[in-house]
Image (cartoon, grey):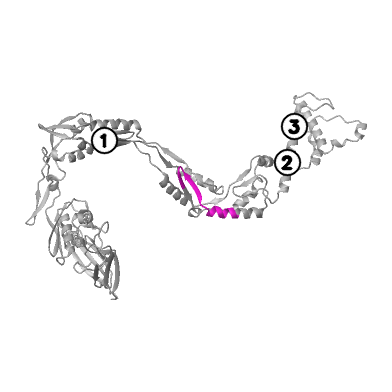
Amino acid sequence: MLPVRQLGGRLPRLAELSPLGGRLPKRAPRSSAAASAPRPARLTGFSGAAGRLRELLDGVAVRRGLAPRRPAGGPPGPALLAGLCCVSALFLLLGIAVTERVAYRGRVLPGVRLDGVAVAGRPRAAVRGAVAATAARLERAPLGVRAGQAHLELRPAGVGVTADERATTAAVLAAGRHGNPVGQLLGPVLRHLHAAQVPWAVRYDRGALAHAVDGWAAQVDQAPVEGGLRLDGTTALPVTPRTGSTLDRPGALAAVAATLAHAGGGPVELPLRQTAPRIGGAEVDRVVAQARAVLAGPVTITVDGRELTADPAALAAALRAVPDGGHLGLTLDQGRLRAAMAAQLGQVEQPGRDAAFRVAGGQVQILPSIAAHLLDLGPVTSAILQGRRSAQSTLVTVELRRSTAWAQSLGIRGKVSEFTTRHPAGQPRVSNIHRAADLLRGQVVEPGQRFSLNQAIGPRTPARGFVRAPVIDQGEFSEDFGGGVSQLATTTFNAVFFGGYKIVTFQPHSFYISRYPMGREATVSLPAPDLSFVDDTRAGVLIETSYTDSSITVTFYGDNGGRVVRAEGPHVLATHQPTGQPEQVDDPGLPAGKVITEHAFTGYDVEVFRVIEAPGQPATRERFFTRYKSSNPKVIRGTGPPA
């Protein structure tokens, strides 16, 4: 940048050049007297340069035909005055900018702002210390968050908030010192009118913040309440629709990020999106009016000359409002209506019977199905929904899914496998074995179907006939309802094993129990472990059970395609002896005063092989490995509530 005096000295040479590329006409030489006359002091420096600039601008204007030639010594024209003002303002702004740079060297420029810290005019060391103090607060202090009426909180440590003190300090000191020339020239004035805001350099874990936003959404999201119908006895009442709201997740992430960049000034207002219900009030009013008409009184049903009555209570039990897009459809559930009118329908209907199997003399017999003759409720429900108080219908023949044809298609021809295990008589566990066997008896597994023993037996509860008996729970002896069912599981496992069926899931007992085949046994509990297999033959499987006071037998009937199965083993690979030290165990699952004494168990590593030979196919060999734990003698004392 040239000093003003040097610029004034160079203007005569610049004045010789026209902006259009030509030279301006030279001025007439002054007389010797004029030349020798001393120049006034006001023509030196900036004033002299301005005078020369005025002559330059006049020459340009005359040459381009924009103004007539001004007589020497005349007053300046408007163009010249405007130019002089611009140049004066330019030099003034330049002087202010240079003065500010010199005065604030090594300090923050005036008008620079950093949220949470007073930085304007402060030196580097002071800024660094203030930034460090505020950064520590930003990284530790919880950030208030508000979404609608919910007041939440963000803990910076949970999302890895870290303020970059070095980068923030550097950004504050550099503010206003870089950018385009015009911006730097005008900067001192603009920062006086509006502070230059410097954001904090903050890093955080975006994944952790997104997880936090998901947690907030779970607290504040409110699904819209769809308009609907509810029944209070036989009275139809409206469910008033209500608008819901959900957290705008992208907007919430942006809001938190912006707040962190401004020193965490909270609380952060999270944006919510309104969600309107699809079913409005007009649709609700229409359906409620229709439902009230349906429930206004009994409906008479005539079938084969006999009259039945569906009272409002039966109608209410079957009445449903089903949403379909933005509409509600009023329906009558035929299954519920049939159940509600069971006593009356029994006067005219003839229930059917599924096909079943019976084993007699080792032969599988099919008990044919019997078709049902049921009231056709289609015309009845249609008439009722139309508001009519009477309807006519007929009996229709309904073939059951498990028909005689279905039973014949399964191809169950004879015995495939059978297995028996024995147990002491008279123990509580025997009742559970027999109850589970009764539930398993008659189960049919279709070709390709997966069978689950837990699903077949169901929950082991007192209401379903099970009693408390010893169990092994997570490797420890205890008592629970259904203890002993694992004996049925082991027996079923061996029927699956020797039938050659595909075993999907099973789990051996934790300890070797001598009444079970070593390495060929299974335990079950709810919800796991389970025993399951797949019928991988073309025929179905009929499961039959029988028992005595001291034994349980499971038999599979079907057609396994001539497969022959044999077991190899057990081969004991290792033995693990207990230390022999008795152990005292308190069990809160046992009633207080109950004591169970268990002998020591030797541990084993065992392998068993299943060899399957099928006609026309190479033999397959499957390995089953079991590790039985060793256990010291135990005295287990109950500490739970008294029985």
- Earlier in the chain: of badge 3 and badge 2, it is 3
Residue 135 inside the magenta-drawn segment: yes
Q: Position of residue 375 (x, y in %)?
A: 14, 36
Residue 437 covered by magenta stretch: no
User: Is 493 on the left or on the right of 33, as rendered?
Assistant: left
Q: Residue at x 20, y 69 (%)?
A: 514
Q: CA distance from mark 1 to mark 3?
A: 90 Å
Q: Amino acid at mark 3?
A: Gly
Please, is residue 245 above or below residue 431 in the view?
A: above
Report the disc number at residue 83.
3
* Category of crowding for the residue at label 1, using alpha-carbon neighbours closer than 10 angstroms: few (below 14), some (14–19), many (at least 20): some
Closer to us: mark 2 or mark 1?
1
Q: Mark 2 and mark 3 in contact (Cβ < 8 Å)? A: no
Residue 424 lies in quadrant: bottom left
SS category of the residue bearing label 3: helix
Which residue is disc 1 drawn over?
A: 235
Q: Amino acid at mark 2?
A: Leu
Please state which of residues 467 and 262 is positioned toward the viewer in this rendering. Answer: 467
- Asked if the residue at tag 3 contacts the one at tag 1, i.e. Cβ–Cβ closer than 8 Å, the answer is no
> Tag 2's secondary structure?
helix
- Give the labeled residue for mark 2: 94
